[in-house]
Amino acid sequence: MKTIIEPFRIKTVEPIRMTTREQRLALIKAANYNLFALKSEDVIIDLLTDSGTSAMSTQQWSALMRGDESYAGSPSFYNFEQAVKELMPFKHVIPTHQGRAAEAIVVSIFGGENKIVPNNTHFDTTRANFESAGVIALDLVIEEGKDPACDHPFKGNMDLEKLDQLLREKGDEIPLVMTTVTNNAGGGQPVSMANIRATKELCEKYGKPFFIDSCRFAENAYFIKIREEGFGDKSVSDIVREMFSYADGMTMSAKKDAFANMGGWLALNNDEWAEQARTRLIMTEGFPTYGGLSGRDLECVAAGLKEIVDEDYLHYRIRSIQYITEKLDAIGVPVMKPGGGHAVFVDARKMLPHIPALQYPAQALAVELYITGGIRGVEIGSFMFGRQPDGSEVPAAMELVRLAMPRRVYTQSQADYLIECFEEIYRKAGEIKGMEVTWEPGSLRHFTSRLKPLDIAE
Ligand code: F0G
């Protein structure tokens, strides 16, 4: 069969409130052309993030009732711990309310002025956590990973030569090496097993711990299964276990590849780090058997972890992103290739070449997509990254619109609607105007800034 169907039936629905183009023109103006300022009920298809937006299964909803809310020693914690260890056999599993809380604990153990932590690409909260502790967060993804048009099976791979050189020359300043699977900030691109193994070997050679930022571990493992030689016959669970066998620690956001609406954890093998982490956890998150989560959240994560490694699900998941990527490519929309694991990335620099970087082509495109079809994506470009700590503004490396697909939420006809919206936008791309920022906060401006299109008077 050619058609890969959604491997689930819909039991509960959330009605979508439809809006007209005229209504959306008024709504986006009232939101000062910042998509974060829209009310979600004014959005028809919400592709702002795949984080915390998954549809839970009947198993997860029933697991929720099993949640035991004891402060200490809840059976829900032990269910959660067992589900994590089944896939990621670390000695210590420490729950946190979400991924960035696990990162903050890692930083409290390994951070310090002028230290350097390399990663393929740090996600923005990981970078912000390290930088707030004076650490230099260095991105060492391979060159192919920085070119949206370059077709490479593992564009998330770490540049091993650069890593080797860094460890050789600045080893004393490096407390930790990380890799992110899949590489979210680099387009949801996977990291190969060979690259994970080789990164670990370099870490061993120089005596450094190796951690995996694991949010989309199952999508990464499925890419290994279908793209890397020698893995085609292995189960995704076995591939996941092998990936983590090379790591000394992991940080995780259960809001992605655990189908949970909230949750995360830090897992470690080293007893001393675990003790430091638990002490920190008690101060900032909670007692080590709940760590900022309710018992019912822990049960939902435990149930979700069993479902995320289902290969029918992963087959559909990866195919549904490829489907949109291929259809957009076929109508001429420049997309990041090959399709990533959780999102489609549109190259706005190529699609709107008449808009200079500092007039935010990707923000202009994201706004146009909302006006055209009520679809909300997110700008990842000069609006998000352009403002520098010294107040100057420089163009970002890429001008992308990310369309992140929530897990098990939207159907193929909703994907077809998205493609149709792009067909319309593509026809009149030359008419889209750049944008300017009329107000911005001191930092992280993309969340709250106000903007306006350049042809509209104040
Ligand atoms: N690491 C990566 C690679 C992520 O993508 C995220 C979150 C985090 C860490 C932090 O996890 O949100 O649970 O605190 N990414 C979301 C996104 C927000 O939209 O890509 P968190």
Image (cartoon, grey):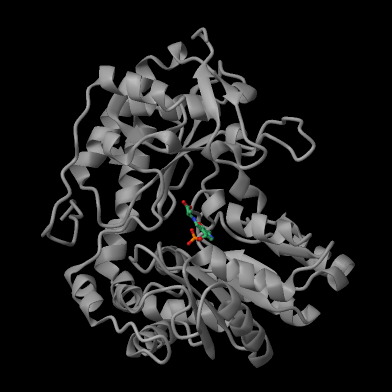
Q: Is residue 3 visible?
A: yes
Q: Residue 433, image x and y in percent?
A: 49, 14
| Near-viewer residue (312 or 431) | 431
Q: Is residue 378 above or below residue 125?
A: above
Q: Quadrant of residue 428?
A: top left
Residue occupying the point 66% across, 55% down: 128
Residue occupying the point 41% across, 92% down: 73
Q: Is residue 150 above or below residue 91?
A: above
Asked whether, in this view, residue 146 is left or right of residue 35, the answer is: right
Q: Is residue 19 above or below residue 159?
A: above
Residue occupying the point 78% across, 67% down: 164
Q: Is residue 198 visible?
A: no
Q: Residue 328, image x and y in percent?
A: 36, 34
Q: Is residue 2 above or below residue 401?
A: below
Say which quadrant the N terminus sits in. Answer: bottom left
Q: Quadrant of residue 226?
A: bottom left
| Near-viewer residue (28 or 424) | 28
Q: Residue 181, image x and y in percent?
A: 52, 64
